[in-house]
Amino acid sequence: MAPLYNAPSVRKPPPYLQNQNTKAQHIPTNSNGIFDEPIFLTQPGTRRNTVLPLKGSYYGTELYTPMLGVMFFKPADLRHSLFRYVENKDETLQELDERPVVAFITDDSPLQAADVRVGHVLIRVNDVEVNNPRHACQLIKEGPRPLPLVFFAPTSLEITLTEGSYMVKYDTNDTVAPNGLRDWKYKYVVVGGLIAQPWMMNMYRSKAEYDIAVVETQSRRPVSVKVKQFSLKAARVMDEGVQVVKYKNELQPRKYIVLLDASQYPIKISAPTLDELAPILQGIRSALPRSSTIRMSSSRRSFARKDGTESTQDSRGSMDSFVRPGLR
């Protein structure tokens, strides 16, 4: 793992970039911004395979800022997180070798503005091929600004991110949705991830505070933000699976699940759509005991409330069709 770092003095960007918020820009190499030819070594002999055999595309970016706002990990370190559901995992990890993989990006990262995403692989820094995360960090820290970077965006890898912004409720004994939308709490929910065990579910007040927690943890500093932690070791999803609740001020019914654990109140997690709920369901399903399944009930039940809202349990089949999204 390679942490965030500061670089030495930075040159000012050219005039056409000085008034822009984006501090990293793509270097177009054709109409699509993709290199037409494979990326070869500029220093022969540092690696046998000069081109990754995986399906994907190479692209270039220039960095003008001292901070990247990303973390690089070795592929093998991501076996049980980002690469959890990659097909032919052992072969894929061998092909990637120790090349630095983007495993974390802060919201204000200049590389995020340049469309660098989690799961992308850093190939070259300032025309030098990188061997591993530590080597990459050294080259970036000591390199000039603007600093040319070349990334590989794999299209054949299924990247698993078990986190996202959700509405939650965990402070009552109720196993049905709250009466009103205001009764939910907004949280950034992470199952496992970079700084917790796979069976732990952490809730932060925002994505920005999760970013702070990651940086502080990886820097071995005390975490300064608030986090609500839940163990999923003894948890199970309520038998009804994914449920639906319709509120007056929302056009579409909201989807939610209920996690049960004898040692704590029921945990309700909701999102506007099944697609938005899917990432956290992915992590929960992986963390739950094998005897616990996340399936929809074959029945439909509605609960009328005094305020006119309706909580519904509906039949939609197995969760397997939508709990394993790829990175978008």
Image (tube, rainbow, N blue to C red):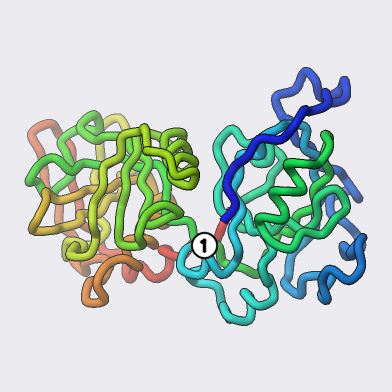
Question: How many discs mark residues in the rendered view?
Answer: 1
Q: Residue 240: in sight, yes or no?
A: no
Image quadrant where residue 18 sits: top right
| 133 or 280, nearer to the observer | 133
Residue 234 at x, y percent in the picture? 17, 65
Which of the pair 203/272 is nearer the observer? 203
Residue 215 image point, x, y percent: 49, 41
Q: Is residue 121 visible?
A: yes
Residue type, mark 1 in image: Leu
Give neighbour class at mark 1: few <14, some 14-19, many 20+ (Cα, 10 Å): many
Q: Is residue 97 left or right of residue 308?
A: right
Could you say which quadrant of the image residue 89 lies in? bottom right
Q: Is residue 234 left or right of residue 53?
A: left
Side of 322 relative to 201 (left or right): right
Q: Residue at x 68, y 70 (%)?
A: 96
Instruction: Give the percent coordinates (x, y) of residue 29.
Output: 90, 49
Q: Residue at x 14, y 51 (%)?
A: 266
What residue is pinned by disc 1?
82
Does residue 145 sit above or below 296 in this rendering? Answer: above
Q: Position of residue 154 (x, y in %)?
A: 69, 63
Please tell me whether residue 67 is drawn above or below residue 160 in the rendered image: above
Residue under the image location 30 percent in, 39 percent down: 227
Judge whether 202 appears above or below 300 on screen: above
Residue lying furthest top in this view?
19
> Which quadrant, please, contains the N terminus?
bottom right
